[in-house]
Amino acid sequence: MKWTEIQEIAIQLSEARPEIDPTRINFVDLMNWVMALPEFDDDPKHCGERVLEAIQQAWIDELA
């Protein structure tokens, strides 16, 4: 899984961390959680604030 797979990352985060409210996360934690996903395999340098914002929004949408 790569940084560009926003929706899949959001789904996996919602399953892996059901106790987390994605509206209250910081981007450092979010980036670490994404990189810790078992299927994730991408360079951290390919991640930026816009990518993290998109993941956060997709995660929020996933729970709605």
Image: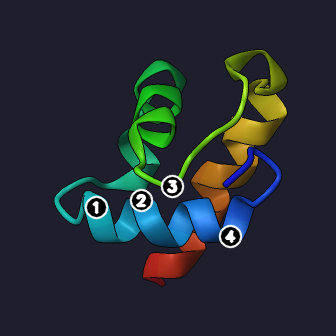
| Number of the front mark, 1 or 3 | 3
- Amino acid type at image mark 2: Leu
Residue contact between numbered discs 1 and 2, judged by CB atoms under 8 Å: yes
Sequence-earlier tag: 3 or 2: 2
Query: What whole-number distance in Å separates the C-alpha atoms at marks 4 and 1?
Result: 14 Å
Element marked by disc 1: helix
Using the image, tell me which numbered label, if any, was put on residue 7. Answer: 4
Within 10 Å of disc 3 (Cα), the crowding (few <14, some 14-19, many 20+) is: few
Query: What whole-number distance in Å separates the C-alpha atoms at marks 4 and 3?
Result: 14 Å
Query: What whole-number distance in Å separates the C-alpha atoms at marks 1 and 2?
Result: 5 Å
- Amino acid type at image mark 3: Glu
Give the residue at mark 3: 39
Within 10 Å of disc 1 (Cα), the crowding (few <14, some 14-19, many 20+) is: few
Query: What whole-number distance in Å separates the C-alpha atoms at marks 1 and 3?
Result: 12 Å
| Number of the front mark, 3 or 2 | 3
For image coordinates 58% across by 75% down, the residue present is 61
Residue 5 image-quadrant placement: bottom right
Sequence-earlier tag: 4 or 3: 4
Using the image, tell me which numbered label, if any, was put on residue 16. Answer: 1
Within 10 Å of disc 4 (Cα), the crowding (few <14, some 14-19, many 20+) is: some
For image coordinates 41% across by 59% down, the residue present is 13
- Please tell me which residue lies in front, 6 or 35: 35
Give the residue at mark 2: 13
Element marked by disc 4: helix
